[in-house]
Amino acid sequence: MAARTLAASPLVDELVIADVRSEGVDQMVAALAGGSSGRAGVSGTVVDATDPASVAGVLDAADVVVNCIGPFYRFGAPLLAAAIRAGVTYVDVCDDLDATRAQLDLDAAATEAGVCALIGMGNSPGFANVLVRYAADHLLEVVESVDIMHIHGGEPAEGPAVIKHRIHAMTNDVPLFIDGEFRSVRMLADDGAAFVEETEFRDVGTYPVYPYPHPETITLPRHLPGLRRATNLGVVFPLSYFNMTMDLVRLGAAATEPVSVDGNEVVPLEFSVAHLISERPRLLAEAGVTGPAGCLKIVVSGTQAEEEGTHTVVFSLSSGSMGAGEGTGIPAGLGALLLLDPGLRRPGVHPPEGIVDPLAMLALANEILPRLDLGNGSEGGMVEVPIHIAHHRPDGTVEELALGLG
């Protein structure tokens, strides 16, 4: 989806698809070159992300690199470092907390090299951060709390990197920003269970959401001085699939050290990932899930200068026919398109809320989305960003808002 978004823009002269799987490269190049919305010259090449020389060869002569290689706790910081060495503007969809911290530690190196890096420009993190920035810039005087919740499921397939990221989230500390201080919990421990809540997601339904170690909770406090609370909670449907993942983790089947089974070395994590991939079609069928859907819900509360009391703005970016691919890839492509303008590139490593102009991104989205043939708008294509905004005022009234792009 990131590549399709880039190919749909007249700003892109040449698009190179790079992956370790040559057959996947060929298929994507053929699909993009034959697409009705494609304007760019599209070519492909093979790259091995574990080989610095291979990565350097791909980055040579590029203006912008968009990194979609996961899991990011393995590939995020090394590929950003490679972009800095190559002097190439960098965008990724990193949603791992530890990887984000490692990338932020490269800020001085990027600044010295004059490289602009936009990290976590997906859904959550990514569009979530941009919408919080929109609320801070245009709707509230002071943002005091941000609760980000996300759900997706039903995609045609999930690769090992996606599942490993989910397991990584279940086995690592989750930082939550509560009452102006950071508090660490674990998704599957009692301290994490205290934050699990039932949430109604537009176009998807009501589901429990769990603490997730997504990096908004550590980046938003850096950019919103009045912030006292920031949480990130998520889940995947069907719940039988998410619960099976949690059960495997609880059983200890997420270990990365090999164990001997009848004389053969087996890595429990690799077994769990393979088992989940094999079981997923059955679980989707039993739950009656026939296609993707997803929702990003953001609850932003704060104050306005002209009215006493707490104002709450609820954003819902939702779809009953699209899931994680569109929700993650389209924002990444839009972020890269914005940074094709040299005037918008600020050296350093930046989360979305630190560098992305919400109005510019939303206007660009409304320009690009009709070209993507996403199949849920007039004449078969989406025509505008599917964001619902509700403003809850202190007096209890609720006002539906439209995005102010003028």
Image (tube, rainbow, N blue to C red):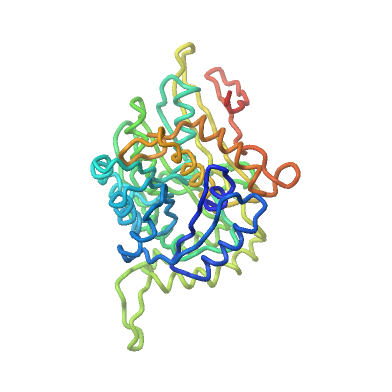
* Residue displayed at 66% across by 42% down: 370
* Residue 218, percent from left and from top: 33, 40
Q: Which quadrant is home to the C terminus?
A: top right
Q: Is residue 47 above or below residue 395?
A: below
Number of numbered callouts drawn: 0
* Residue displayed at 60% across by 24% down: 398
Farthest residue toward the bottom? 263
Q: Quadrant of residue 288?
A: bottom right
Q: Is residue 77 above or below residue 226?
A: below
* Residue displayed at 34% across by 57% down: 73
Q: Nearer the viewer, residue 57 or 212?
A: 57
Q: Nearer the viewer, residue 165 or 275?
A: 165
Q: Quadrant of residue 112?
A: top left
Give left or right: position of 353 versus 347.
Answer: right
* Residue displayed at 33% across by 65% down: 50
Q: Quadrant of residue 126?
A: top left
